[in-house]
Amino acid sequence: MPQRLGKSLIRLPHGDSSPQLAVLQRMLLALGALLTAALVVYLDRKGYRDINGDGISALDAIYYTTVSLSTTGYGDIAPATPSARLVNVLVITPLRVLFLIILVGTTLEVLTERTREQWRLQKWRRRVQSHTVVVGYGTKGRSAVRALISDGTDRQQIVVIDPDAGQVAEANTAGITAIHGDATRREILVMAEVAEASRVIVAAQRDDTAVLVTLTVRQLNPTANVIVAVREGENAPLLTQSGANSVIVSSEAAGRLLGLSATSPAASEVFEDLLVPHNDLEMVERDLLPGEAGRSARESKDLVIAVLRGGKLHRFGTPAAERLETGDRVVAVRHA
């Protein structure tokens, strides 16, 4: 993967300071030092000697201070009287030092920032593994990220991909590494280290984009848990064939919730409660607690609604879900 491409697209989260603003501030400081020196020289123009002998104009004063502060010093204009030389010692020389500090300091900071960014990028690549890649940082993507973080996922273990620079900046503001690019391109997914990811959440704006991303992700990582959101239910089987482990049909889910709210308001309220992180109730998948193995699922302190055993999900009410065994994982409803 070309390093130049990676540096231009991967955005690691930064602080609130803007490098463009910092450079602009320093340019204004340098310009202020230049104009101050030019004004001092022009006010004392009678104490300076021009090799042409035609006096010192405002342009000559600016020219003299420019070559003086930049340490060029052609010598065609020079202080001739003691007062002018004293002004050079007490005013022009300190301004020259300030000008050089601004110039050299800005250059060093740019080089240092570039080196620091490369170091941070290399450190991030070494650290990122078994992470979560979120494709799309729109409404669905942001909600998914918030849910991950509220459930204990470290922000540093989340990588967002979005073609919109504004969404990338928003992810950075939230402390999340983001990549500005099109996730249907293989190299963009490679930048996100999809091959090392444990989960990939596809929340693209278009269903055809979701299919292409899912196919590419599955080629790069055959074992990751791929969760995809689509708008139309007719596209769900295609995504399942493309390698998605779970397909969420957003339009149908919203429609079912609307219908449930109309016919069973209380059930709808409980369902909404489960969807809001850390509300009264929450749904979790967890390992067995000490003492639960060998006992009935009904004896658990949480409401067990499914048992995951040997990679197969046994739902509440089935014989396999009645008794818990060592190595099981359970899906349960509990107080938040």
Image (cartoon, rainbow, N blue to C red):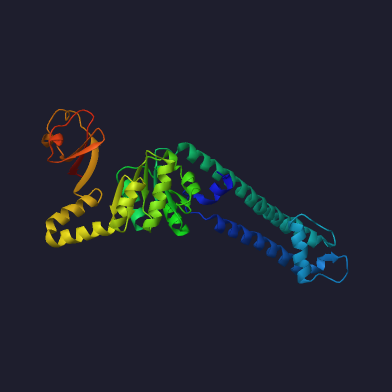
The number of discs equals 0
In the depicted structure, whether residue 5 falls above or below residue 302: below
Instruction: Name the spot of residue 57 as percent of width and height, x first.
Output: 79, 71
Picture quarter with the C terminus: top left
78 on left or right of 208: right
Q: Nearer the viewer, residue 77 or 80?
A: 77
128 on left or right of 246: right
Residue 200 picture quarter: top left
Instruction: Name the spot of residue 152 as percent of width and height, x first.
Output: 32, 42
Instruction: Name the spot of residue 220 as percent of width and height, x first.
Output: 44, 42
Instruction: Name the spot of residue 321 as percent of width and height, x first.
Output: 15, 36
Q: Nearer the viewer, residue 201 or 56?
A: 201
Residue that appears at 32% across and 53% down? 229
In the depicted structure, whether residue 193 falls above or below residue 207: above
Residue that appears at 50% across and 54% down? 17
Q: Note whether residue 188 is visible.
A: yes
192 on left or right of 298: right
Residue 222 picture quarter: top left
Residue that appears at 52% across and 40% down? 122
Picture quarter with the N terminus: top right
Q: Note whether residue 156 is visible.
A: no
